[in-house]
């Protein structure tokens, strides 16, 4: 049976759409090593560059082989405004969590006044958690932990959909990027992403389809 498309939105108000002159945008990406977090952040950086933005970013390397958290920051806007590649507490405009529990770990960088969360509901159980049979919190509990730090919070089943449609769950990352743009919380143009995707060495067509599906998800 085909999996039902799922999108849940929990918010106290829509996150402000940041556009036009004086744009300074900070996106925080978080996931588990091996999920493609760095690749997704790079796609955003390249799309922002294509649109003429000054781009800075920072990644934490070295944990991919350990199944650890991979936080990555991409900032774009004018060179005058985007001074540092890093952000401080509560400074993220957008948090994209490719693994649900990692969203809760990213709340330090979020603020109830401004931050939008895009979360995939596809859990990635750490090896030690499986070995020790440790409990994984339900999605409702994770949402409860994140809500105090989110102005806008959306949960998607992108990885499940990508696994079903393309046979590769990681394409859910591209779907989430499309959802962020479709929902209006990532101020970049779909055409810029399609240009970045077109230049991909592998599975460009599948990534484009996943991105377009994400756009539709975000607009629902």
Image (tube, rainbow, N blue to C red):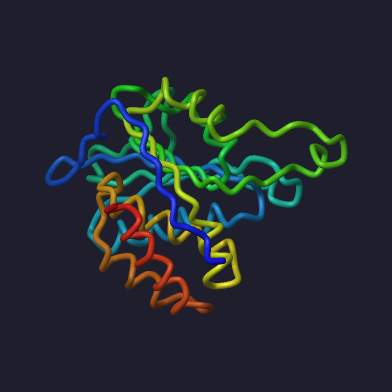
Q: Nearer the viewer, residue 197 or 154?
A: 154
The extreme top residue here reads: 148
The quarter holding residue 95 reads top left
In the picture, measured across the screen, residue 129 lies left or right of residue 146, that is: right
Q: Which residue is drawn at 36% across and 44% down?
A: 75
The extreme front residue here reads: 1
Q: Residue at x 56, y 35 (%)?
A: 139
Is residue 84 visible to us here? no
x and y, in percent, of residue 18 in the image: 20, 41
x and y, in percent, of residue 106 in the image: 51, 31
* Above-or-below relation of 113 to 206: above
Q: Which of 65 and 129 is in front in this view?
A: 129
Q: Which of 138 and 58 is in front in this view?
A: 138
Q: Which residue is drawn at 54% across and 73% down?
A: 166
Q: Residue at x 83, y 36 (%)?
A: 133
Disc tally is 0
The quarter holding residue 142 reads top right
* Above-or-below relation of 14 to 4: above
Is residue 55 visible to us here? yes
Quadrant of image for the N terminus: bottom right
The extreme right residue here reads: 131
In the picture, measured across the screen, residue 134 lies left or right of residue 85, that is: right
* Above-or-below relation of 77 to 39: above
x and y, in percent, of residue 113 in the image: 29, 23
Q: Which of 4 and 214 is in front in this view?
A: 4
x and y, in percent, of residue 73 in the image: 45, 42
In the picture, measured across the screen, residue 44 lies left or right of residue 165, that is: left
């Amino acid at each position: 049976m085909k999996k039902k498309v799922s999108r849940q939105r929990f918010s106290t108000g829509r996150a402000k759409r940041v556009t036009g002159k004086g744009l300074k945008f900070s996106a925080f990406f978080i996931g588990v090593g091996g999920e493609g977090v760095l690749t997704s952040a790079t796609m955003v950086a390249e799309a922002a560059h294509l649109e003429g933005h000054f781009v800075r970013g920072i990644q934490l390397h070295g944990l991919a082989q350990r199944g650890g958290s991979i936080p990555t920051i991409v900032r774009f806007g004018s060179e005058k405004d985007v001074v540092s590649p890093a952000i401080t507490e509560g400074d993220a405009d957008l948090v994209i969590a490719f693994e649900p529990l990692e969203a809760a770990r990213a709340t330090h960088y979020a603020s109830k006044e401004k931050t939008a969360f895009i979360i995939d509901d596809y859990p990635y159980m750490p090896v030690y958690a499986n070995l020790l049979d440790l409990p994984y919190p339900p999605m409702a509990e994770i949402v409860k932990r994140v809500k105090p730090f989110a102005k806008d919070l959306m949960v998607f089943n992108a990885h499940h959909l990508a696994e079903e449609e393309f046979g590769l769950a990681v394409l859910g990352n591209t779907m989430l990027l499309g959802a962020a743009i479709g929902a209006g919380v990532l101020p970049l143009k779909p055409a810029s992403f399609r240009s970045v995707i077109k230049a991909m060495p592998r599975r460009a067509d599948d990534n484009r389809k996943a991105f377009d599906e994400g756009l539709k998800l975000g607009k629902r």
